[in-house]
Image (tube, helix red, strand yellow):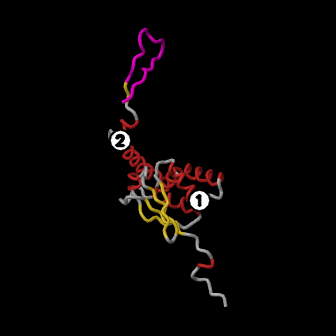
Amino acid sequence: LTSREERVYGPRGRGRPSKVFVLTDEGRADFRQAYDDLAIAALRRLSAAAGPAAVRELATERLVEVEARFRGLRDADPERPAIAALVEALAVDGYAPAVRPVSSGDQLLQHHCPVANVAAEFPIMCEVETLLFSRLLDSHVQRLATIAHGDGVCTTHVPRPVRPADHPNRKAAS
């Protein structure tokens, strides 16, 4: 709880200003929220009324701000690795992202998913996000795990680019 002066509409009377007590966002979080239920119901209705393509469009539009942040970060520092810019762009929305290097490239980890319950019913949310990562990182990425599917962390594999000299189909010089 926190206190603040009561809002007065019109002239204030005599005496000390009245105080009112209100819940903070943190206090409100202790109560059950139905945002996910509402979002799922709305997406079901959207899908029934306009078809699954409308849900895909909504999922795509939802990520426009992530892409804009990514592009801004890349424009500001073109030498910065793309995956580092993506991590920063995702962090703003609460994904708690990180990168883990692996022998074949990197793994983009999202330790939190703000839409996990919705994505459990509408996997298109994860699919569209994966396509965005692929486009932004200019790589064929592969989703290995998702929180929406019951995994502890969303994990996306970002392979290291194959250099021509390393390509297995390259013929040996004679």
In the visual, does 58 lie left or right of 122? right
Dot 1: element: helix
Task: Please name the residue shown 42% across and 52% down the image.
Answer: 112
Q: Position of residue 133 (x, y in %)?
A: 54, 60
- Give the answer, above or below, for where 2 lies relative to 54: above
Residue 131 percent coordinates (x, y): 53, 61
State the extent of the magenta-drawn residues as a range: 1-20
- Seen at 66% across and 88% down, the residue is 173
Q: Which residue is mark 1?
A: 82
N-terminal of the two: label 1 or label 2? 2
Q: Are marks 1 and 2 in contact (CB under 8 Å)?
A: no
Viewport quadrant of the C terminus: bottom right
User: Local crowd at mark 2 within 10 Å, few (<14), some, or many (≥20)?
Assistant: few
State the image coordinates of residue 80 (x, y, percent, origin top left): 61, 58
Report if residue 120 lies within the magenta region: no
Q: Residue 32: image x %, image y %? A: 32, 41
Can you identify the residue that label 2 sits on?
33
Q: Quadrant of the N terminus?
A: top left
Amino acid type at mark 2 = Gln
Disc 2, SS: loop
Residue type for callout 1 = Ala
